[in-house]
Amino acid sequence: MAASTEPLAPPRARGFWGWWHSPSGRRAQFVVVYAVILFFLFLVLRRLGLDTAFQLKWLPFIAGGIPVTLLVCFGSIALAVVLALLGALGRISRNPIFNGMATFYVSIIRGTPLIVQIFFIYLALPQIAQTFPDRPWSRLLILPSIAAGILALGVNYGAYMTEIFRAGIQSIPHGQREAALALGMTYGQMMRRIILPQALKVIIPPTGNEFIAMLKDSALVSFMGAQEMFWRAQKIGRQRFRSMETLLVAAALYWIMTMMFESVQRRIEARLGRSEREVVMH
Amino acid sequence: MAEPIVSVKNLHKWFGDLHVLKGINLEVQPQEVVCIIGPSGSGKSTFLRCLNFLEKPDIGDIHIAGYHMPAKPHYSRKEQKLIREIRMHVGMVFQSFNLFPHMTALENVIEGLITVKRMPREEAVKIGEYFLEKVGLMDKRDEYPNRLSGGQQQRVAIARALAMQPDVMLFDEPTSALDPELVGEVLKVMEELAAEGMTMLVVTHEMGFARHAANRVIFMDNGVFVEEAPPEEMFAHPKHERTREFLRHIL
């Protein structure tokens, strides 16, 4: 019956294998796996006989396109967020005009390839402008390449993000709506003060994913002449007949950018998750 | 007899084919406390929610807090504005509290004053603190709802409704979602409110509250008001068999 005077504790793992299975050991396992995969990738790439000196020489030039890439992406995501919010409100609305427009927008943009939309904005808009030669606003349709790129990407991602926003808004419990209305709020007040602030927490993580995807899709706006990173890689690659080298450099840079934004997003999600994991008393 | 503050005539409501409210008539005098009891599915909550038009009735007439709004299939913009005005004068407390989780207790209480009544913030805070004090939760004014117990959340919800200084308060099963130990603190607030003369319509299963605080108890079943009587009479000498059967299970 006499209890041991030593407090019980879980047995501590010892030795190399003890550490190997601990949390820090598991992180090391991960690094090892990554290193092995990268090594094999390296072996494969070596077989291509790439001119690595060339790659290193032009790396700064290619990386110099990153600011333009980021400009296009930030501009596009801002436009996409605005369109997604309007689209979501339209999809939820009982007004047939708003609902119809929003549903059509989502359907046609999600139903056609991004590259087609890009070429359309690049080629078709100026052509349409030409059919209205004496109207002053027709000049607006002839956009500089970066603006056209932002327009195309923003409109495209806005359609996909509409569903994210709609789901986020509809995930807010119905009782919130009722409490707001019971106080005498209008629809607009309810949305602005009660629903959207709560929906934002739900919407931000998937929006982060969209941004990370957009980083790569931004390469397509190079076909409009926007001189972002991919455009630079293509230019040098074609000039010197070393496209494989430069495209791989671009790919590596996209990968690094993606990993950086992923870590930013992890931090944002952790901050959002923490405020909800407060102690709940009952 | 004074002018009734709530007057409902021939209220009908359907959910699809289901006839949920079958010709309800009700008059409530100012400062009266009316409890509505009955089995689930009887339409008690639906009826309450029609009074502030969270549910739109199909047939009937509602006079409440000096306003009149008949049942209509579609409400014009002007009528929607009137409904919002009605809601400013009719407070509602929900079974699931429905506090705004992204705001503190005080912010919850003053939200209606600032956004709907467009009151300047200092004035709203004074009123909000008064009502938080009234429900005994001034010390929790800067806490977020997820750090409050159920009973505390419901009391904040009551303060939030009271801050709008309504003429009528509607309670939709205010204690049904609470752990038994927490029910008492909410009922205490409600009893005080009744004693101070607030007109209250309460859908509840708490017969103790009905006995202490209600002027009138209404038994509702299957979309109709079966029986109405002061609590002592209702509980001691129920006239209808359905009432007797229900009370047998509850008491």
Image (cartoon, grey):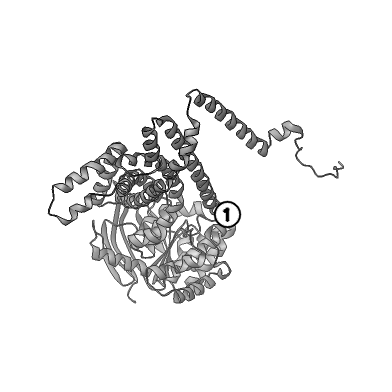
Out of A16 and A70, give the one closest to the viewer.
A70
Q: Which residue is mark 1?
A: A278
Is B44 above or below relative to B62?
above
Q: Position of residue A197 (x, y in %)?
A: 43, 57
> Is B178 left, or right, of A91 in this rendering?
right
Is B107 above or below relative to A205?
below
Residue A188 sits in quarter: bottom left
Is A198 above or below relative to A64?
below
Q: Residue furthest right?
A: A2
At label 1, the amino acid type is: Glu
Residue B241 seen anywhere in this rendered image of the structure: no
Which residue is rendered at x = 45% and y = 38% of the image?
A58
Out of B223 and A224, give the one closest to the viewer.
A224
Q: Position of residue A218 (x, y in %)?
A: 37, 42
Residue A156 sits in quarter: top left
Q: Residue furthest top?
A: A47
Q: Position of residue B172 (x, y in %)?
A: 43, 59
Residue A215 sits in quarter: top left
Q: Position of residue B234 (x, y in %)?
A: 45, 62
Quadrant of the image containing the N terminus of chain A: top right
Disc 1 on helix, strand or loop? Answer: loop
> Is B189 left, or right, of B28 in this rendering?
right
Residue B160 seen anywhere in this rendered image of the structure: yes
Quadrant of the image containing the C terminus of chain A: bottom right
Is B140 above or below relative to A5?
below
Chain letter of mark 1 equals A
Other residues around mark 1 within 10 Å, as few (<14) / some (14–19) / many (≥20): few
Which residue is rendered at x = 46% and y = 52% of the image?
A201
Which residue is rendered at x = 53% and y = 28% of the image?
A42
Which residue is rendered at x = 35% and y = 43% of the image?
A160
